Image: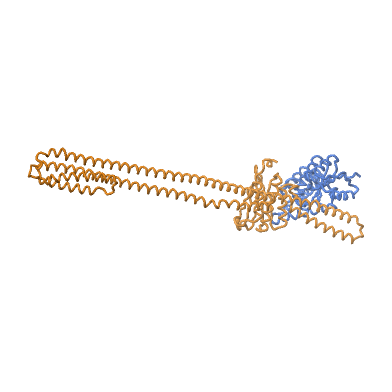
Chain colours: A orange, B blue
Amino acid sequence: MKTASTESNTTASPEFDSPSNGLRWVLPGAFLGLLGLILISGVAASRTLHQMQQQEQLARRDVADRARNLSGLYFSIEGYNEAIQRYAACPAGKPDPVVRGQVDQLTADIGSLLNRYPGNREPEETLLLQTIVDQFARHRQLYTTILVMGPGALRGREQELINDRILAMRQQILESSGELQAWSSQQTRRTDQTLLAQFGHLQASLTESLSVALMAGLVLVVASMAYILRLERQTRGRYRELAQSRHELERLSSRMVDVQEAERRSISRELHDEVGQSLGALLVDLGSLSTNLPDDKTRIRERLENMKSVAERTVGTVRDIALLLRPSMLDDLGLVAALEWQGREVSRRSEMEVTVESEEVSLPDEYNICVYRLVQEALNNAVRHAQARNARVRVMQHDNRIVVDVSDDGRGFQPERTRGLGILGMEERVKRLGGTLTVESAPGRGATLHAELPLPAAAGTA
Amino acid sequence: MRQTRVLLADDHTLIRAGLRLVVEQRPEFLVVGEAADGREAVAMAQSLKPDVVVMDIGMPGLNGIEACRQIRESLPDTQVVMLSMHSDEGYVLRALKAGARAYLLKDSAETDLASAIRAAQEGKSFFSPAVGKVLLEDYMRTLQRTGQEDSYELLSPREREILQLVAECKSSKEIATLLNISVYTVETHRARVMQKLNLRGVPELILYAVRKGIVS
């Protein structure tokens, strides 16, 4: 049964290991992928935003340029008109040089303004601008005529000129520049709309990538949770297995103690009952044979005596073996008598004198045998390893526990280093009954064994 | 002459058969029954009222010592010869405390059983010679190792006389008559002997006497 259980254990372990190996690398990989996705979409979004910002700035600057240019143009043309009017109104033959200079200056200004108008024009815009340029050109033809003719040449027709031509022209240019302005603001609106659309697009793509990341994260969380739960379950299973096998081991070793005692008892009984009694009967028969033998049969008597002594020696040996296996005192007289007997027996056979101090205790058999074997082992150690001269055994019953002390004056040892099988065996026996065992010793200072066994409720009063 | 009625108690048939053989060789003894365990021994003793019960000390169920105690309590006239394999003082002392008069090793049952039954029937004590030897050896060894004095040396000649008579199971009255002194004096001597030898009760005194070879 033992081999079967270990076999199933060894086959179970790799089965536990294999699935977790693959997942161990898949999970971090997936996490890294998710992080990468979030990073890439973040970077892309910020770049797009930056681009849009630049585009917007560019468009604003463009619009501002046009507006400035246009208003400059407008004011210059107005100024020009006024200057022409003033020039025309000057007394004949006396052209005002200041006005003349103003007209020239404004002409140059208008030219340069038209030149400086932003180059990146739409065809429609170019058309509108061209209209203004044409109108101004026509305008200028008239004025050039006026300028050439000199002031006062109109002679009273100034008002008419002003009303019919100049104002009308002015109106035309105003209208044209108004159209251009309208077109420009329309253009601005269009740009705004484009930007808005771009922004909307960006928002949509960001939302999309974020929701993808969220979904992936969710899947990962679920997967990791499943993985962790699975690991936890495996660990718990293995822990349970371990605890169980330890428990089984304890049971096994406790059972081994039981089996050992039962076996010893049965062998001892067998020896005592069968071998011992047969030899005893043989002795009785031999004795009566020798008693009833006529006095002259000396040779037969001698042989009978010889047989008797062999049988007696054998009886003694069998008895010793039986007692070692299971002290019959334990059954016949109880624990204290058995301990006293053991003490005397050790005293007889060794150089160590054993004193047993014990009150009469009445315990269940397993406690008797436990205490007996403890004392036996301790005395054995004291004689064999410590070469002690004196040993003292004390067994006391306090309320609901039994206290056993065995101390000797031997050469001692270091309990934390030397932990022989004997002590382990004692510990095993004591632990089985829920008790504690301590061994105190130091080199040159003897040894004291102290054991406490809790008694079952019924035994204390028995 | 009236025969001594003997009850044999041992859990082994072979041993009982051997004992019966030994006992029945003597015409003055009569085996009235055989019991196979302690309980049966007590029951048979109560119905047959034998003069002497020859009892094995280790028996299943009720052991010999407990059976002896019960028989001695209910039948003061019935004496018990204890049969044992052990010459250890734990056994001897407990057998004496339970009221046994004789303590016999099984090895020497064949030679000594008749003397033991006779001594017990007359109210005297009897011990296998080997028992006295072992007890004495234990005693001497303990004295030697612990460096104690043999307290026997402390006793006066009269006290030694009293010790022997008490160990032979004589009552104070018998001793007084024998030594021609008053019962009160006997009691005083007896108490002093117990005190000097540090003994508690007659069984320990008998054990001491056996150990010293004063009685056998």
* In front of the other: A15 or A358: A15
Q: Which residue is drawn at 87% across and 55% down?
A: A286
B179 and A44: which one is in front? Answer: A44
Tell me if B88 is positioned left or right of A22 in this view: right
- Residue at 67% x, 41% y: name it: A457
Q: Quadrant of residue A77?
A: top left
Residue B127: horizontal and vertical position, in percent? Answer: 80, 51
The furthest residue to the bottom: A299
Name the foreground residue: A79 vs A346.
A79
The image shows residue A110 at horizontal and vertical percentages of: 19, 47
Residue A143 seen anywhere in this rendered image of the structure: yes
In this rendered view, identify the residue nearer to me: A234 or B183. Answer: A234
Q: Position of residue A283 (x, y in %)?
A: 84, 54
- Total labels drawn: 0
* Residue B146 seen from this side: no
Q: Quadrant of the N terminus of chain B?
A: top right
Horizontally, is A38 left or right of A1 in the view? left
x, y percentage for residue A76? 19, 44
Is A73 left or right of B33, judged from the image as shown? left
